[in-house]
Image: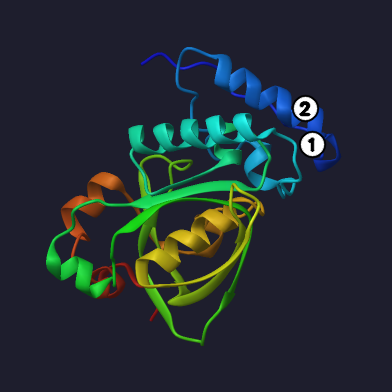
Amino acid sequence: MTQHPHADFAGPATDFTPVRIRDSVRRLLEAEELPPIVQAGHPVLRQRAAEYDGQLDASELEAFIELMRVVMHAAPGVGLAAPQLGVPLQLAVLEDKYELDPASAAERHREPLEFMAVLNPTYRPLGSETASFYEGCLSVVGYQAVVTRLRNVELNYTDPEGRAVEEWFSGWQARIVQHETDHLHGTLYLDRAEMRSLSSNGEHAARWAQPDIAEARRTLGFLC
């Protein structure tokens, strides 16, 4: 499918005015093609996004969330943040219903995650337990790296109806929550990654697709 240019927020965060954000979303909604996913190197991925504070009316917010969901599925991925479409707004969508072999699912504590949209999310640790696994990003196409993340987190966010929500996540769901929330604060997974583990998708599939990272850790020499 042909893609069109995304909104270009390349200036300071003070340029993230409600009018500019609303206009950028309207352009995306009016376009006939799916928007491209912004790639690493674009400033919008390195800036703290504006908190959602009514910049969009209810119908625009609903339509934008649905567009984000479609783009996420088309990629495909398990999460997408508004900055990845060039919109510096604290909004993300998450959903994980992909089939995984039982051994990998068990090792990663990966269970289905129903679709959800979160506004202004923040997370905090529930305990000190961590887990280290390969992960990738739709804004860093073609690569994966090992990231150590909290195994259990509490997520506080506002839902699209304006309700304050507190929800606990564990395992792979907690990893998705952290990854997408980080996007809204200008952080990419590579900032937290073990860079000696960095692998192209092809090398990962050929060598490091085991349920755990033990072989990759020994061979590539990280987390020693």
Q: Is residue 19 above or below residue 117?
A: above
Q: Which mark is residue 73?
A: none
Q: Position of residue 185 (x, y in %)?
A: 66, 54
Quarter of image, res 171? bottom left
Q: Position of residue 6 (x, y in %)?
A: 59, 23
Quadrant where the image shows the N terminus: top left
Q: Nearer the viewer, residue 80 or 93?
A: 93
The residue labelled by disc 1 is 16
Instruction: Give the residue type at disc 2.
Output: Arg
Residue 211 in view in this figure: no
Question: Residue at the spot x=68%, y=24% of the render?
Answer: 24
SS class of the residue under badge 1?
A: loop
Q: Position of residue 134 (x, y in %)?
A: 34, 62
Q: Residue furthest right?
A: 14
The residue labelled by disc 2 is 20
Q: Is residue 175 above or below residue 86?
A: below
Q: Is residue 59 above or below residue 76?
A: above
Report the side of 75 relative to 45 (left or right).
left
Question: Residue at the spot x=67%, y=42% of the render?
Answer: 89
Give the Cα distance between marks 2 and 1: 6 Å
| CB-based contact (under 8 Å), mark 2 and mark 1 | yes
Residue 36 in view in this figure: yes
Instruction: Give the residue type at disc 1.
Output: Phe
**How busy is the neighbourhood of tag 1: few (under 14 within 10 Å), some, or many (20 plus)?**
some
Q: Position of residue 40 (x, y in %)?
A: 55, 40
Q: Nearer the viewer, residue 39 or 2?
A: 2
Question: Residue at the spot x=36%, y=35% of the render?
Answer: 75
Total numbered labels: 2
